[in-house]
């Protein structure tokens, strides 16, 4: 960590790792006082929660304290045993967080979900606060419209009596935050990503409370706060002479120290997935064996809309999440208290859907003092195939390969400890994602190629709808349709072969928008322009008027003219032109087979490259 340049009431630093980011948070925890406010600024993944984790673990003397991002719960309140009794009124007012209130901003409904029961809940720590009885509020109003957090949290009171760590303070609104108030320390973190290499940090004082400290740090070129050893209070000996049991969280953490040993193999992890249109939960043992799983599908919810509707998906997740998790635990024969950790998808995905799974995971972790494992959706796809339980056994119903066929390559063996044989290449084909990823280790990925427009999954779904398939997802029925077609019956353009950009033509990137458009051209008749459609509608209306006038039916002529000049005739003509292929089943099958051939060949070519 070194000083780069300084200005009045401002210090700039460089942080080389997540540990240094957490260390800075711990240093700030040594100097805070009641009523202090710290703003944490930076993009998603910049390290704001890592700094908060270091701060809270140091302030409460609990090195194992779980500190999740408060994004989905808006506010997390940390206290020790004394703090819980000292402050009766919670800062988070859940009485105003009703569904109607959450929908007040109709222009951004996805950013104003109704906080669930338990939002803003108190998290009791295992240590003693540096200031006994003091409460620390960890606040993140990112998902709320600007200024909306004022209706949920009594921040003016918190600014006087508590210590506040606030991520995304830009969302507080002008009534709560001005250039001069509240007095605060602003910590701006630059850079993004889990590796946290080369973070640039700017520390700025607003008000005299912090100005004197920042002046000292600025003169030294660093944050001059030493971290003395935390003395743990002596524990009372057991009255029955038995050994004192380890703290629940510490006991579970101990399992991680023996990777590859018996303890690691016996770990029990509950996984929760709610990133899109299915609610999933499973219990996996440390050796990769799935003990129990449950899936609540939403296929019937979205078919009538032709795609996933985020708000409907969120409602379905909310209705299914508790029963899905309970059923997975029941099938596994595992009680929540016996789990070693809870893992949950935190992204990418639909934010409205992700929050349901994250909230459930946070509540389980808090209720049973379990570690929370934050899972990247795409990384999970890349690593889950290496679970020992995913290695498929030979299917006796399938005939063995012919002698002249090339035998399938055996799957590489796992390394000691159950680790995959890094490095390896993964072709990720999942929903809206389509990428080639080189993986050198957990959290160490290089994206070699990605889709420039549509993914192959989106192309399959859209092509299926063009062919009159309403099912969601459209891929399986399209594949069945293609099985009865001739793949060479139609010539479709090979993606990215006609571009003049050599970087695209010879890259590992994918593109399916052009292929999808070519399929539409095959299915739909030649579309007239909008101007041509309007001219044809006017001509048809005028002809109808003339015919009606000749028959002496002036009223009918007037009605016909009004209908022709409106949008109805044009929409009807457009709908007729855009109708999917009808009764010609063989032609539909041929188009599906031709599309599938080109789409898969594009995947193979880019992967081989």
Image (cartoon, rainbow, N blue to C red):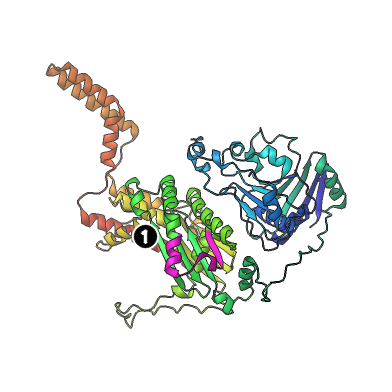
Q: Is residue 184 left or right of residue 88?
A: right
Q: Is residue 567 left or right of residue 135?
A: left
Would you say residue 401 sits in the magenta stretch? no
Position of residue 111 measured from the top left corner of the image (x, y, whole percent): 53, 42
Q: In which quarter of the image is the N terminus?
A: bottom right
Position of residue 112 measured from the top left corner of the image (x, y, whole percent): 52, 41
Q: Is residue 1 left or right of residue 154?
A: right
Q: Residue at x 31, y 61 (%)?
A: 479
What segment is highlighted magenta in the picture?
Answer: 325-344
Position of residue 339 measured from the top left corner of the image (x, y, whole percent): 54, 67
Position of residue 145 measured from the top left corner of the image (x, y, whole percent): 57, 38
Residue 28, compared with residue 547, is above or below; it is: below
Q: In which quarter of the image is residue 123?
A: bottom right
Q: Residue at the far left: name it.
A: 551
Would you say residue 339 sits in the magenta stretch? yes
Q: Residue at x 28, y 39 (%)?
A: 575
Residue 495, compared with residue 6, is above or below; it is: below
Q: Is residue 336 visible?
A: yes
**Residue assigned mark 1:** 598
Q: Residue at the far front: name it.
A: 239
């Amino acid at each position: 960590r070194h000083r780069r340049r300084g200005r009045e009431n401002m210090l700039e630093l460089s942080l080389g790792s997540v540990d240094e980011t957490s260390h800075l948070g711990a240093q700030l925890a040594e100097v805070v006082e009641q009523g202090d406010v710290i703003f944490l600024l930076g993009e998603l993944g910049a390290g704001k929660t890592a700094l908060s984790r270091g701060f809270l673990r140091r302030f409460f003397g609990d090195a194992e304290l779980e500190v999740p991002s408060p994004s989905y719960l808006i506010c997390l309140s940390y206290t020790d045993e004394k703090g819980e009794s000292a402050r009766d009124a919670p800062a988070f007012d859940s009485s105003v967080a009703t569904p109607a209130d959450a929908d007040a901003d109709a222009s951004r409904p996805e950013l104003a979900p109704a906080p669930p029961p338990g939002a803003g809940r108190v998290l009791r720590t295992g240590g003693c606060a540096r200031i006994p009885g003091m409460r620390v509020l960890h606040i993140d109003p990112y998902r709320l419209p600007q200024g909306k957090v004022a209706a949920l949290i009594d921040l003016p009171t918190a600014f006087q009596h508590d210590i506040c760590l606030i991520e995304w303070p830009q969302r507080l609104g002008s009534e709560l935050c001005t250039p001069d108030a509240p007095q605060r320390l602003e910590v701006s973190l630059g850079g993004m990503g889990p590796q946290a290499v080369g973070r640039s940090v700017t520390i700025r004082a607003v008000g005299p409370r912090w100005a004197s400290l920042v002046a000292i740090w600025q003169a030294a070129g660093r944050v001059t706060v030493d971290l003395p050893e935390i003395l743990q209070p002596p524990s009372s000996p057991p009255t029955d002479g038995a050994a004192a049991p380890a703290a629940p969280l510490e006991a579970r953490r101990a399992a991680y120290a023996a990777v590859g040993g018996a303890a690691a193999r016996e770990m029990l992890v509950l996984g929760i997935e709610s990133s899109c249109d299915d609610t999933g939960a499973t219990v996996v043992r440390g050796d990769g064996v799935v003990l129990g799983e449950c899936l609540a599908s939403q296929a019937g919810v979205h078919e009538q809309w032709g795609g996933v509707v985020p708000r409907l998906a969120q409602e379905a997740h909310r209705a299914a999440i508790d029963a899905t998790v309970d059923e997975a635990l029941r099938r596994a024969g595992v009680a929540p208290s016996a789990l070693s950790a809870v893992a949950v998808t935190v992204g990418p995905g639909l934010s409205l859907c992700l929050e349901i799974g994250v909230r459930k995971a946070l509540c389980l972790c808090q209720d049973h003092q379990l570690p929370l494992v934050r899972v990247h959706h795409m990384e999970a796809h890349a690593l889950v195939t290496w679970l020992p339980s995913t290695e498929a056994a030979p299917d006796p119903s399938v005939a063995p390969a012919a002698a002249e066929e090339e035998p399938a390559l055996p799957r590489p063996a796992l390394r000691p400890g159950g680790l995959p044989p890094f490095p390896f290449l993964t072709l990720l084909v999942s929903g809206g994602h389509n990428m080639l990823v080189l993986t050198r280790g957990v959290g160490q990925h290089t994206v070699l190629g990605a889709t420039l427009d549509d993914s192959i999954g989106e192309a399959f779904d859209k092509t299926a709808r063009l062919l009159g398939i309403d099912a969601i997802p459209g891929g399986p029925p399209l594949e069945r349709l293609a099985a009865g077609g001739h793949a060479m019956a139609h010539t479709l353009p090979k993606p990215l072969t006609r571009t003049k950009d050599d970087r695209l033509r010879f890259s590992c990137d994918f593109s399916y928008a052009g292929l999808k458009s070519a399929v539409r051209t095959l299915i739909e008749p030649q579309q007239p322009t909008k101007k041509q459609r309007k001219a044809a509608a006017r001509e048809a209306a005028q002809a109808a008027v003339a015919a009606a006038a000749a028959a002496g039916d002036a009223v009918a002529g007037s009605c016909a003219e009004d209908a022709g000049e409106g949008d109805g005739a044009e929409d009807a003509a457009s709908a007729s032109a855009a109708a999917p292929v009808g009764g010609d089943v063989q032609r539909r099958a041929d188009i599906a087979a031709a599309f599938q051939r080109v789409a898969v060949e594009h995947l193979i070519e880019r992967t081989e490259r």
